[in-house]
Image: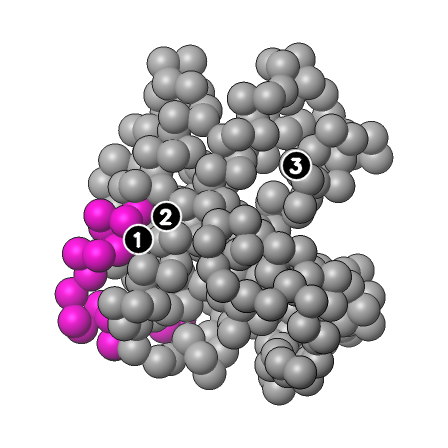
Amino acid sequence: MPTYDLYLESGPRRRTTMVHVPELLGCVAVGPTTEDALAATPAAIRAFRRFLGRHGEAIDQDAPIGTRVVAHVTEGKMLGMGSPYVLFAPDLLPTTDEDIETVLRRLGGLREEFAVWATSQTVAHLDIPPRGGGRPAWEVLLHVLGATGPTLSAALGSAPGFAATHGAVVRGELPMDDALRRTARMAGVRIRAATPDQRTTGRELPGGHRTLRQTLRHLLEHDWDHLIELSRRPGGPIL
């Protein structure tokens, strides 16, 4: 039975918590408390394994799930919802060519699922705020799109073209599905161009040290978390 190491982040009172599963890079679970987040983790792992299967990764969908908590960060900035400042032990490993191709395959799969779902919806449906509060789906998609460049810039120093693509969607000059697919391709070009130093050392920023592996983890987790968010709404993506 595979046993997945879990890395948690929350405030010191262990309220809103995000559980990270680095061995399934991109997989996270969130809950209003640490206990709730841990309880939601097996279902999140199963959903993520289904996602990997849909996009060609060989994985045993029926394998039982074992987990163990190996770290819990309770001090820092923006904890509990995917803080970009948190560094876990796996984030300090050098980023290999194989790692990059895995990330890009998964990013392409995530953006494709967003794109296919978005084109199946009417403009009116995408603009409806969810019951109970929150952003309309259109704003969630814009947020996913707009976060790509700044996320990559944290480790790579620059990520040109992403802001212009986001702006073109906002102005109605580029369809959302085209922009989602385009930004996945653009990310591939920028990430593959990372220097050896960027792949191993990272950058020191005012908010703390950033590594490429940490940034790529955050990029996938951010997309996956919002795909899950949309899947919980009526008519949302089926995961």
Q: For the residues labelled 2 and 1, say whether their Cβ atoms are less than 8 Å apart.
A: yes
Q: Is residue 189 left or right of residue 138?
A: left
Determine which of the numbered discs, if any, sits on residue 198 in the image. none
Query: Which residue in the protein does label 2 denote?
Result: 150
Mark 3: which amino acid?
A: Pro
Residue 186 showing in the rendered view: yes
Q: Nearer the viewer, residue 21 or 153?
A: 21
Q: Give above or below for 155 relative to 93.
A: above
Tell me how far mark 2 sits from mark 1, CA to CA.
5 Å
Residue 33 showing in the rendered view: no
> What residue sits 16% from the left and 65% below the top?
195
Residue 121: quarter of image: top right
Which element is circle 3 on? loop
Determine which of the numbered discs, if any, sits on residue 153 in the image. 1
Tell me how far mark 1 sits from mark 3, CA to CA.
29 Å
Mark 1: which amino acid?
A: Ser
Percent x, y of residue 196: 16, 71
Picture colour scheme: one colour
- Specify whether residue 207 is painted magenta: yes
Q: Give above or below for 151 relative to 183.
A: below
Mark 2: which amino acid?
A: Pro
> What residue sits 30% from the left and 41% below the top?
185
Of the 4 image quadrants, the one containing the N terminus is bottom right
Query: Which residue in the protein does label 3 denote?
Result: 237
Instruction: Tell me which numbered mark, 3 or 2, is placed earlier along the sequence.
Output: 2
- Specify whether residue 22 is painted magenta: no
> What residue sits 52% from the left and 60% below the top?
26
Percent x, y of residue 38: 76, 71
Magenta residues, start to end: 187-210
Q: For the residues labelled 3 and 2, say whether their Cβ atoms are less than 8 Å apart.
A: no
Tell me how far mark 3 sits from mark 2, CA to CA.
26 Å
